[in-house]
Image: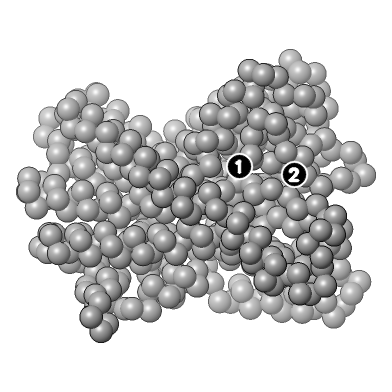
Amino acid sequence: MLLERRPTGRRSFCDCDVERSLASNTTVTIPNVANNRPTHVGRAASVLDASRSLAALAVVIEHARTAILVDPRSVAAPTGASMMVYWVSGFGHQAVVIFFVLSGALVGGSLIASISSGKWTWRSYLVRRLSRLYIVLFPALLLIALWDGAGMALFPVHSTYQDVLSAITIGSHTLIVHNRDVVAFLGNMAFIMTVYVPVFGSGAALWSLSNEFWYYMLFPCIVIAVVHRRDSWRSLCNIVLALGILVFVNRDIIEWMIIWLLGVAVVRLPRVRMSKVRATQLVGASLLIFGVTTAFERTLLNTVSLGGDVAVGFSFALFLYCVFCRESPAPVGADMRRSAVTWRRLAGFSYTLYLFHQPPLAFVSAWLVSTQHVRWQPTAPHVAVMLAVVGIIVAYSYVGSRVTEAHTDLLRRFLTRLFIKPSGIPMNSGMKQPPIVGDAMLS
């Protein structure tokens, strides 16, 4: 029930000029540079929110299908309808590729402008990134231990838990860990899952968080080394730090950064000025290219490969670029405001949904195999139950986001007062503090 990957392995706004859409919490940040590229709001913000929402949902649907329904090769009486169910529910990995592109656009693009302005500091950067990451990651790891512990207690013979989990007793408490190694919990907190430790318990989706974190650490080093190349000492220090990160992480993380950088290119490339009609035509054509490319990789390749993922990432980046070219700084209409609010609400807990969904699905799979002795065939009633479970998982994650993701600003302000204010930067200094933005699933 995990996203398939190769066995070998595989966000951060600072002070910069941003413009928030009246219709969305998602912000597309474009630096004020000489070529006067416009800041895009409205429909572009809705597209970003919709992309995050649908990508997170695609991941949940694939994992729900693998938890509840039999494998495609085990279908007793394959039909066109049943094969369509498996095909439509199989885009989870492509959804993660979309997350990487979005993250590069929303984090990497603004980071360049912030560093160039001279206002950027590692301290403020880390406060913003780590507050965003940990406010959901730590509760997610605790919930993994809770769900897996309950699953092992109720369904001790189910292979979901026997193969990857074991119980370690510490004092009077039992901690569930992956591969009998209690270090896995701390390793996941340190974002070295898939690098030196496995993902913790049944939270297989955590693998991409490791990629994201190291992109956040590596990219500023590269940008600082280039932007401040005349400051030889500062540039050299960041080059050494970047090389250290490259040596520390595994090859897959480095290779997949190509996809993340495609998102940076979307924001940094100059906008092509064209008529609204022509721009709309290009948006439609690029969307078609993205759909065909994604369907091609899913159907014909049907495997995880860097080349296929880069193709999907490039086609999605092309679509985003055309959307941004289509937009203008004109006020957002009331109809677009309503549309954006819908996507904003769904995207507002996409990070929580991404990290929270898998342990309860593992529990459901364990219950099915223990009570029914097999996962279900893809009949209409069983598919309906699967979709109902998806709805419950979405609701469960939304409730969880109210006590985690919804309080990111509160945690960020606390950490800012704790770590930044004492350095001499007054909290009311007038510096622009950009809003929380969508870091792919980390939004």
Q: Is residue 277 above or below residue 252?
A: above
Which is nearer the eye, 6 or 66? 66
* Quarter where residue 82 is shown: top left
Label 2 neighbourhood size at 10 Å, few (<14), some (14-19), many (20+)? many
**Residue 116 in the image: above or below residue 400:** below
Is 421 positioned to the left or the right of 344 in the image?
A: right
Q: Would you say residue 138 is visible in this rendering? A: yes
- The reply, left or right, for residue 298 in relation to residue 209 is left
Percent across and percent down for residue 44 are: 67, 32
The one of 219 and 27 positioned closer to us in this rendering: 27
Mark 1 lies on a secondary structure that is helix
Q: Amino acid at mark 2?
A: Thr
Residue at figure coordinates x 61%, y 72% from the top left? 246
What residue is shown at x 54% (from left), y 32% (from top)?
343
Q: Amino acid at mark 1?
A: Phe
Q: Where is residue 307 shown, x and y percent of the image?
A: 52, 49
Q: Residues within 10 Å of mark 1 (few under 14, many from 20)?
A: many
Q: Picture coordinates of residue 297 (x, y %)?
A: 44, 39
Which residue does the numbered mark 2 point to in the structure image?
29
Residue depicted at 22% across the width and 73% down the height: 166
416 left or right, relative to 410: right
**Which residue is label 1 attached to?**
314
Scheme of image coloration? one colour
Picture coordinates of residue 212, whole percent (x, y): 56, 59
